[in-house]
Image (cartoon, rainbow, N blue to C red):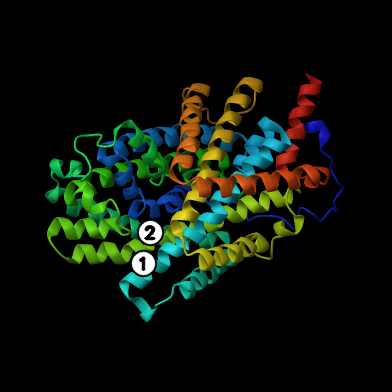
């Protein structure tokens, strides 16, 4: 494929009009970004896995997905330190699998990050209506305000956006800590297994484990987006591995605590269909509304906002990188005076607002995002393995413990996650597959003839080919 793409000459000011702000994020901000991507999944969504597999099925599914994400994070830490580009997963796959594989990976990631904010906006709107805030009876004004305000903050500057995001995430983390501490005295092991349809550890058998895999993902979905900030990190070779692994450690602790204490305090049956499981767990455990339930209820909104806010950052950087290299229309990658990719922020934001307003179906939208994510995981882990085999001498400031074996484990589990998405929502999986096919057709018939050789991801490949020729 590398010989079947064509590059176009671009003006000398092309990259000058497409520059991000360097040195805006250290490893603490990167870790905060990783937690922020995911934290809304601690407040809602994971509990639907109780209906699929019971508590035992969800525990096994979450343990498998925790293993997948931990192994994947270790692999991405190596790739992000060796290839620190804004394209992240797309850039890694571009080096390992060529232009077609890189573009397919980038599109899968872009689907995940462009659709997820629309889903979260729907959840935020539902939260606002449930709490009776502002007297709203329709959620579309909430969707509009969310996109306008938080896209606007990102337009102001990446440093300011990441610091505000860290504050919002800190508030949400404080609510989770309060929930965990408050539920410890109410824990009863028998409540974990009170699903009506069955009893025992696996009331729905091993088929329930497969059905629960998608919901185990919710505890960790999008942490892989940390490498998208590589070009804005102070020292990506050091900060990227530290940031992504610190975020993963925090997420593992919260996933274990919530998975045990929420159903262990309220009962699995009480939470299996809840749209607001943590406040509902407190009410069930304490026999009514309490100050803790109200705090978790209101601050849960901060968790949703944190993920919404941070994923806007992720979709803009992925779109920026694909556009800068010519895989998508180049005008989308222009940056403004404050070094933010303003069109890559605004265009997906407008699409997200439209999707949220038209569908008002958060579950459908998040399932589309999950399928895109799982597909990208498969391609990124293949990329790590290919680069380990084909380019053993690549400069790797950080090396994945276990090497290709570690990412091989993540690859197998990612394939299982892709299969599981078809069991949970075939319609959503079909939509995602259709978007990927249309994007690949665009690449094949147009963009592969108009790539930009000066883009960092393309330069990495050119250097690698030159080194091979010299060798």
Kindly give the residue lying farthest to the front in the view shown: 197
Q: Which residue is mark 2?
A: 303
- Above or below, 289 against 141 in this view is above
Residue that appears at 30% across and 36% down: 57
Element under disc 2: helix
Residue 15 lies left or right of residue 145; in this view the side is right
Q: How far from the left and from the top, in percent, is residue 259? A: 27, 44
Q: How far from the left and from the top, in percent, is residue 46? A: 35, 48
Q: Nearer the viewer, residue 196 or 30?
A: 196
Residue that appears at 83% across and 44% down: 449
Q: Which mark is residue 30?
A: none
Q: How far from the left and from the top, in percent, is residue 166? A: 43, 57
Q: Which residue is mark 1?
A: 127
The disc, 2 or 1, on the residue closer to the chain's N-terminal end is 1
Q: Nearer the viewer, residue 301 or 399?
A: 301
Q: In 3D space, how far apart are the residues under numbered discs 2 and 1 (Cα atoms)?
A: 11 Å
Residue 284 visible to an observer of this rendering:
yes
């Amino acid at each position: 494929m590398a010989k079947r793409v064509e590059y176009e000459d671009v003006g000398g000011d092309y990259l000058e009009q497409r520059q991000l702000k360097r040195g805006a994020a250290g490893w603490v901000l990167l870790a905060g970004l990783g937690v922020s991507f995911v934290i809304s999944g601690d407040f809602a969504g994971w509990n639907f896995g109780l209906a699929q597999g019971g508590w035992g099925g969800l525990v096994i599914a979450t343990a498998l997905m925790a293993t997948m994400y931990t192994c994947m994070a270790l692999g991405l830490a190596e790739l992000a330190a060796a290839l620190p580009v804004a394209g992240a997963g797309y850039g890694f796959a571009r080096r390992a699998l060529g232009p077609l594989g890189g573009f397919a990976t980038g599109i899968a990631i872009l689907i995940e990050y462009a659709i997820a904010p629309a889903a979260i906006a729907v959840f935020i709107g539902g939260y606002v209506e449930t709490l009776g805030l502002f007297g709203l009876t329709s959620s579309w004004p909430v969707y509009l305000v969310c996109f306008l305000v938080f896209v606007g903050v990102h337009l102001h500057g990446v440093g300011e956006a990441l610091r505000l995001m860290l504050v919002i995430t800190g508030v949400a983390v404080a609510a989770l800590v309060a929930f965990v501490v408050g539920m410890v005295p109410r824990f009863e092991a028998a409540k974990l297994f009170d699903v009506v349809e069955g009893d025992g550890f696996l009331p729905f058998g091993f088929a329930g484990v497969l059905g629960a895999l998608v919901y185990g993902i919710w505890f960790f979905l999008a942490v892989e987006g940390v490498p998208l900030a590589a070009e804005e990190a102070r020292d990506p070779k050091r900060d990227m591995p530290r940031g992504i692994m610190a975020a993963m450690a925090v997420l593992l602790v919260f996933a274990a605590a919530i998975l045990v204490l929420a159903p262990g305090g309220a009962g699995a049956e009480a939470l299996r269909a809840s749209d607001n499981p943590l406040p509902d767990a407190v009410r069930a455990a304490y026999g009514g509304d309490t100050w803790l339930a109200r705090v978790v209820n209101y601050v849960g909104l901060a968790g949703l906002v944190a993920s919404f806010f941070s994923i806007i950052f992720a979709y803009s950087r992925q779109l920026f990188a694909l556009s800068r290299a010519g895989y998508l229309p180049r005008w989308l990658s222009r940056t403004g005076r404050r070094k933010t990719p303003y069109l890559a922020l605004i265009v997906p934001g407008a699409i997200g607002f439209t999707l949220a307003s038209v569908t008002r179906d958060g579950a459908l939208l998040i399932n589309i995002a999950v399928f895109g994510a799982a597909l990208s995981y498969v391609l990124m882990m293949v990329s790590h393995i290919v680069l380990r085999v084909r380019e053993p001498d690549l400069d790797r400031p950080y090396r994945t413990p276990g090497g290709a074996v570690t990412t091989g484990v993540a690859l197998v589990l990612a394939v299982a996650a892709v299969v599981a998405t078809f069991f949970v929502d075939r319609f959503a999986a079909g939509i995602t597959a259709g978007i990927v096919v249309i994007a690949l057709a665009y690449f094949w018939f147009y963009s592969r003839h108009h790539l930009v050789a000066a883009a960092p991801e393309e330069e990495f490949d050119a250097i690698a080919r030159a080194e091979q020729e010299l060798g």
